[in-house]
Image (spheres, rainbow, N blue to C red):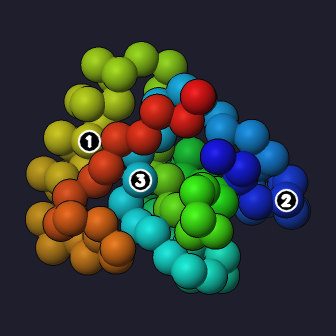
Amino acid sequence: YEIGSGLVGSEMCKETAPAPWLLAVGVYRMSTNAKANAQRLQQAGYPHAVWLKGPENKWYTISDYARSLDSLKTMSRRFKNTHSDYPYVGLPASPVIINAF
């Protein structure tokens, strides 16, 4: 997974995955949509939200990331419980855990 093209001002967009486990909450064809979603999440209290380029030229919005799968599973449950009406664009109605490495 490639994450954008570097830090731009205060925007969180990195060149490589920030951790081995990522919590995807949206998949888009355009980077601008993934970026806008990540910025909304940052404003909503998810300071680690990023957007990244994944396989097949799709862009992912990542709400959070962790070094361990157990930690990310906890984050996934918390996100799902606190965002019952979240749209999860391009995903199966819930956050998706991605192993970035």
Q: Residues within 10 Å of mark 2 (few under 14, many from 20)?
A: few
Q: Earlier in the sequence, mark 3 or mark 2?
A: 2
Q: Is 14 positioned to the left or the right of 65 in the image?
A: right
Q: Earlier in the sequence, mark 1 or mark 2?
A: 2
Residue contact at pointers 1 and 3, CB within 8 angstroms: no
Q: Earlier in the sequence, mark 1 or mark 3?
A: 3
State which quadrant residue 84 falls in.
Answer: bottom left
Tell me if residue 4 can be seen. yes
Percent x, y of residue 60: 52, 62
Secondary structure of the residue carrying tag 3 is: strand
- Residue sticking out furthest to the front: 56
**Residue type at tag 3:** Ala
Task: Kindly identify the residue that appears in the image at 66 percent across and 39 percent down.
Answer: 17
| Disc 3/disc 2 C-alpha distance (Å) | 19 Å
Percent x, y of residue 76: 26, 41
- Residue in the foreground of this view, choosing between 85 and 99: 99
- Residue in the foreground of this view, choosing between 12 and 68: 68
Q: Which mark is residue 24?
A: 3
Secondary structure of the residue carrying tag 1 is: helix
Residue contact at pointers 1 and 2, CB within 8 angstroms: no
Q: Which mark is residue 76?
A: 1
- Quadrant of the snapshot with the C terminus: top right
Secondary structure of the residue carrying tag 2 is: loop
